[in-house]
Image (spheres, rainbow, N blue to C red):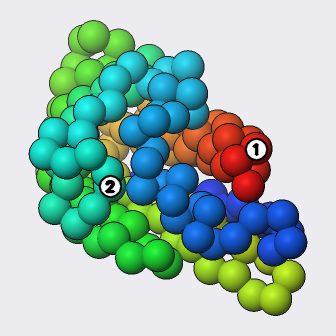
């Protein structure tokens, strides 16, 4: 398993938890702006992120391309969880492997700050796939991708705040 965490913190006078939650609820509107590596994002059975929503999206990071089919498992103002039990990863067009992917967003605040944390978890069905993923730098590649998404997301929701 590979787990990646990235957190952004903003001044509570500049943005509210509600603003960030609404940004996530309508991520389909800005998904392609979060990274030039984002290729597609489609809500299959609804018009907004909500429990039970199905999302199909394709993205690249480094030489890896991934096709996801997420289901939104949790949707609260503090916590959104997307799970794709069998995302398909293509590595350089040479090797393909299924990966269980979970993306969790956590929104919290105190008197002075609002925080948005993203946790990406990649679980491999075969040990050899996890070994290969570690050898080719999957953690580094996807850590940089999550950081890019979060920082671009920050720019978007801070503009809207």
Residue depicted at 33% across the width and 31% down the height: 41
Q: Position of residue 95 (x, y in %)?
A: 22, 20
Residue depicted at 45% across the width and 45% down the height: 27
Residue depicted at 19% across the width and 24% down the height: 96
| 43 versus 122 height, above or below | above
Give 151 or 99, whichever is nearer the viewer: 151
Residue 67: numbered disc? none
Q: Position of residue 90 (x, y in %)?
A: 26, 22
Give the secondary structure at mark 1: helix
Would you say residue 144 is visible in this rendering?
Answer: no
Residue 159: numbered disc? 1
Instruction: Categorize mark 2 by other alpha carbons within 10 Å: few (<14), some (14-19), many (20+).
Output: many
Q: Is residue 11 left or right of residue 54?
A: right
Q: CA distance from mark 2 to mark 1?
A: 21 Å
| 40 versus 2 height, above or below | above
| 106 versus 23 height, above or below | below
Would you say residue 25 is visible in this rendering?
Answer: yes
The numbered mark, 2 or 1, whose residue comes first in the sequence reads: 2
Residue 49: numbered disc? 2
Please identify the quarter of the rendering in which residue 1 is found: bottom left
Q: Is residue 51 left or right of residue 21?
A: left
């Amino acid at each position: 398993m590979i787990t990646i965490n990235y957190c952004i913190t903003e001044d509570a006078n500049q943005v509210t938890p509600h603003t960030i939650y609404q940004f996530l609820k309508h991520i389909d509107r800005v998904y392609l702006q979060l990274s030039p590596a984002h290729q597609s994002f489609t809500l299959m059975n609804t018009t907004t992120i909500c429990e039970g929503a199905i999302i199909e999206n394709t993205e690249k990071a480094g030489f890896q391309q991934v096709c996801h089919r997420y289901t939104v498992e949790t949707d609260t103002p503090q916590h959104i969880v997307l799970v794709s039990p069998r995302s398909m990863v293509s590595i350089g067009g040479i090797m393909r492997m299924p990966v269980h992917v979970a993306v969790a967003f956590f929104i919290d605040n105190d008197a002075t700050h609002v925080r948005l944390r993203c946790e990406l978890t990649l679980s491999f069905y075969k040990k050899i796939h996890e070994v290969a993923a570690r050898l080719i730098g999957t953690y580094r590649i996807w850590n940089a991708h999550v950081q890019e998404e979060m920082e671009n997301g920050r720019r978007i929701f801070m503009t809207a705040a």
